[in-house]
Image (cartoon, rainbow, N blue to C red):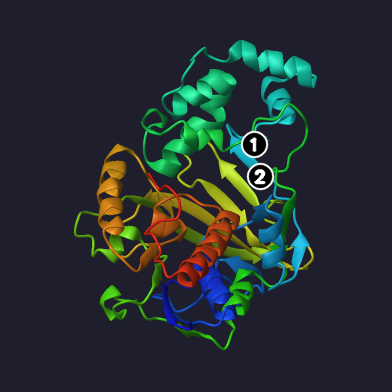
Amino acid sequence: MTETVFVAGAGLSGAVIARELAEAGHRVEVYEARDHVAGNCYTARDEETGVMLHHYGPHIFHTGDTQVWDYVNRFTRFHSYRHRVWTTVGGKVYPMPVTLATINQFFGQALTPAQARAFVADRAVSIPEPANFEEQALAMIGRELYEAFFRGYTEKQWGRSPRDLPASILKRLPLRFSYEDSYFNHPFQGMPEDGYTPMVAAMLDHPGITVHLSTPLDPAQVPSGAQLFWSGPLDAYFGMKLGRLGYRTLDFEHLRGQGDFQGCPVMNYGDVDTPWTRITEHKHFAPWESHEATLVSREYSRLAADGDTPYYPIRLVDEKALLSDYVRAAEALSGVTFVGRLGTYRYLDMDVCIREALDAAAAFLEAREKGGSMPAFLSSVL
């Protein structure tokens, strides 16, 4: 039975769900508060330099999910791209994440992989069950590497002491005792030839989909009995009536010039007295292009306020308590499913957003076939 489904948000989650349901024969009305599609992975040509600008910070596509990789390649051409990151600390430049090269350069050694493993183990602090970011770092790499590469950067990024942050944040970063310097380990990595915006626009280009830009969706607009997929902020759905969930947001300072500013796509700055966290040089994300001009963005992190774009859910003690209240409120609803980074208040990479959106669309089709309804969440968000 064909029905009209409503989607709040034209980012990756909303676009994938809309496409899947439109291809299954449903009408989909997509509402987007911003004046463009693609959410925070929005890209556009800079008029002055011709460089493709990642407006909301760098986005690199990487995944180990073959179905997700095949899916995005339906809508754009991807170029192979291996992301590499460098960090400036104490006036010197090192590769990140921490690799054998980082260890040898920082300590002035020429260690083999086995020697480096033992060398770092000798400096690691014995903490059987690390309770926070700092303890996890000390147990993993020892005090010298932690102080140099993680403490200052983390304080700037999160605005909190690493002792106040969960250990899980650091667990996302690899420690390698080899000279492999790719930032990600996934087998599929690439950049869309024309940026992410055309890819998302292609997903939404279907006769069964209507996109309403610059049009926030008021949940009260959705007809009774219709299904809504909400990829906006979870607390915004409820009008913040229980309180505001905490996010970090980013400010960007864009600089234009000629030549090559830093020789790499991303340079982190680990020193706490350097106010920015990193500098992105956008043209290095498209090595198949040639630009005499350049565009770089200094990135500053701060607590999100009213009207700011939310980037990173904080998920500390206070936020988790409030999140539990919103989850209970959401689960008491019918006809609303919360998806994506904002809707589930989780830090999700692009490939995970797509995977969960594909699963959400499949769950909806199965539920309708069986005459059932959708849950508020398809995976645990607490």
Residue drawn at x 53%, y 19% as measured from the top left? 139
> Left or right of 108: which side holds 334?
left
Q: Where on the picture, by quarter, is residue 305?
A: bottom left
Between the residue at mark 1 and the residue at mark 2, the CA separation in whole angstroms equals 7 Å
> Left or right of 238: which side holds 371?
right
Image quadrant in which the C terminus is located: top left
25 above or below 41?
below
Asked whether 238 or 89 is in front, the reply is 238
Residue drawn at x 38%, y 32% as measured from the top left? 161
- The image shows residue 351 at horizontal and vertical percentages of 60, 56
Any part of residue 127 in sight: yes
| Residue kind at label 2, given as amino acid type | Val
The residue wearing badge 1 is 97
Q: In what element is the residue under mark 1? A: loop
The residue wearing badge 2 is 85
- The image shows residue 249 at horizontal and vertical percentages of 40, 55
